[in-house]
Image: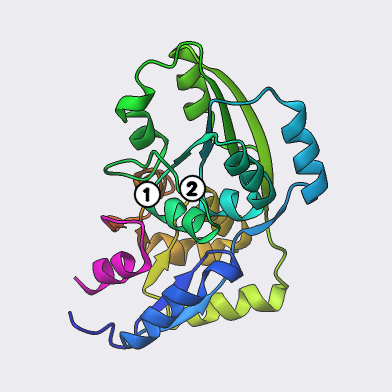
Amino acid sequence: MSSLNGAGVLITRPGHQSAELARLVEKAGGVPVLFPTIEIEPAASASELLSKFHALSRPDLAIVVSSNAANYGEPVLAKIIAQDIRLAAIGPATARTMQHLGCQPGIVPASGFNSEALLAEDEFRDMAGQRVLILRAQGGRELLGDTLRQRGATVGYLEVYRRILPQPGTGEVEKIESLWAQGGIRFVAANSVETLDNLVRLLTQDGQRLLRASRIVTISERVVRKAEQIGIAAPALLAGLPTDQAMLGIMLA
């Protein structure tokens, strides 16, 4: 398929992160339908983050687990750079965000873009005596920190942002579901388990039935498994790279 031929794509990302995928969908002949199922906000002020950072022991390594962690943790990243602390990024998209902020991560997974991929890097095999700081969201996954502790590291967290459930009006949900029921949505772009969980929470029972009959598009194997768990019949489309272009490509394939 060289064109989306008018197919609607429900984009569940936070509003400030939807523009590029929406542009690509439209350029490919599709119809982007923006319905954020997650909102991002700072977990603390810049001064509060810096105070928390200075209260910690100087880490040997700081890990940034997402582009949001880089953006909302920018005041801390500036201090990390000034102290010449090693930096790691969870994947290439996060690394690019960090570079835009003026810092170059020394460790980026050779392939993959999640905790598992980062932990597979040689630098993380033996962490005995290492002090690690993880910049993340409130309530983030524990796999990275738990595994590093098992490998001998001392791990601390700096939670720089939080994810919240949006509160769309009843009319907005009805409008989305009406469009869906008329065949106006073919694909659902969901890059995290939380965005998919929140979508289910925001939809009515009729909307949930429409979701189960749709095609999920994602960059995450965890989302693929979650889609199966909630009863989405069609196999999810898994993009090979964490980019908007790759997500579009898998819809066009």
Whole-percent x, y for residue 231 in the image: 39, 50
Asked whether residue 108 is in view, the answer is yes
Residue nearest the viewer, comparing 182 with 39:
39
Left/right of residue 48 with respect to residue 163 in the rendered view: right
Image disc number at residue 49: none
Which segment is the magenta one?
240-253
Q: Does residue 52 belong to the magenta stretch?
A: no
What kind of residue is marked 1? Answer: Ser
What kind of residue is marked 2? Answer: Val
17 up-or-down from 118: above or below: below
Give residue 217's quadrant in the image: bottom left
Whole-percent x, y for residue 224 in the image: 35, 48
Q: Residues within 10 Å of mark 2 (few under 14, many from 20)?
A: some
Whole-percent x, y for residue 1 in the image: 17, 79
The kind of secondary structure element at disc 2 is: helix
Check whether the beta carbons of the residues at disc 1 and disc 2 lie within 8 A of each other.
yes
User: What residue is rendered at 65% in x and 77% in y?
Assistant: 172
33 up-or-down from 16: above or below: below
The image's colouring method is rainbow
Give residue 171's quadrant in the image: bottom right
Asked whether residue 181 is in view, the answer is no
For disc 2, the marked residue is: 193
Q: Does residue 242 belong to the magenta stretch?
A: yes
Image quadrant in which the C terminus is located: bottom left
Q: Residues within 10 Å of mark 1 (few under 14, many from 20)?
A: many
Whole-percent x, y for residue 243 in the image: 36, 62
25 up-or-down from 119: above or below: below
Give residue 15's quadrant in the image: bottom right
Image disc number at residue 220: 1
Residue nearest the viewer, comparing 241 with 238:
241
Distance from label 1 to label 2 (Cα)? 8 Å
